[in-house]
Image: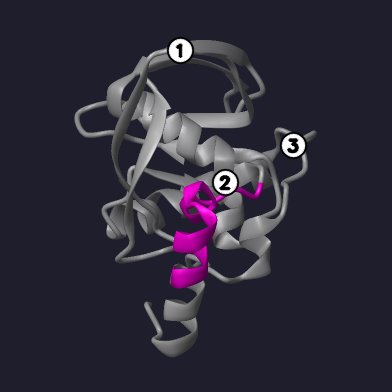
Amino acid sequence: MKILHYPDPILKTVTADVVDFDQDLKDLIQKMIPVMKELDGVGLAANQVGILRNFFIVQIPQKKLVVAVNPKIISFSEDKITSEEGCLSLPGLYLDIPRSKKVILEAFDEQGRKFTMEATGLLSRAFCHETDHLKGKLIIDFLDLEDRISFEAHLNTRKLF
């Protein structure tokens, strides 16, 4: 299992909801954990490793691993924080991205049990980032047109990864 890098088209593909909470799902999750940790990642969406299913894993330092299947952010705070954000699928690129200070995530765990979790700080940012991935949205999609054109030109002249 390996991380896909931009411009792989799978990264821009919207994932399909998980319907079977089976051993296959559990095995995929277990395979994703060391991939994320090996690269010092905080989160990893399924489509980043070529799996077009709607789930992600997140683990911020000193906290328990969160597995979110069919996640939906049901509440975004109006207060935003702009902070530097990177992405395992865009190694070496860091952008200032505005994110809600607090979100409420609704999802299922790998057993199919529904849960709701309030998150702030890095966990909130990670939930937003990974949920974006599952919708085919990357951090470069936050760039304005001029910066996006510059980024794409840079990609065409120099291999980033």
Between 32 and 75, the residue placed more toward the observer is: 75
Q: CA distance from mark 2 to mark 3?
A: 15 Å
Q: Quadrant of the C terminus?
A: bottom left
Residue topped by disc 1: 78
Q: Residue 88's mark?
A: none
- In the image, the segment drawn in magenta is 136-150
Q: Quadrant of residue 11?
A: bottom right
Q: Quadrant of residue 22?
A: top right
Residue topped by disc 3: 18
Closer to the camera: disc 2 or disc 3?
Answer: 2
Q: Main secondary structure of the magenta part?
A: helix
- Image position of 158 (left or right of 112): left
Q: Which class describes the residues within 10 Å of circle 3: few (<14), some (14-19), or many (20+)? A: some
Q: Is residue 128 visible?
A: yes
Q: CA distance from mark 1 to mark 2?
A: 22 Å
Q: Residue 133's mark?
A: 2
The disc labelled 3 sits on which kind of residue? Val
Task: Give how far across and how far down residue 33 sits, in percent.
Answer: 41, 48
Q: Earlier in the sequence, mark 2 or mark 3?
A: 3
Closer to the camera: disc 1 or disc 2?
Answer: 1
The disc labelled 2 sits on which kind of residue? His
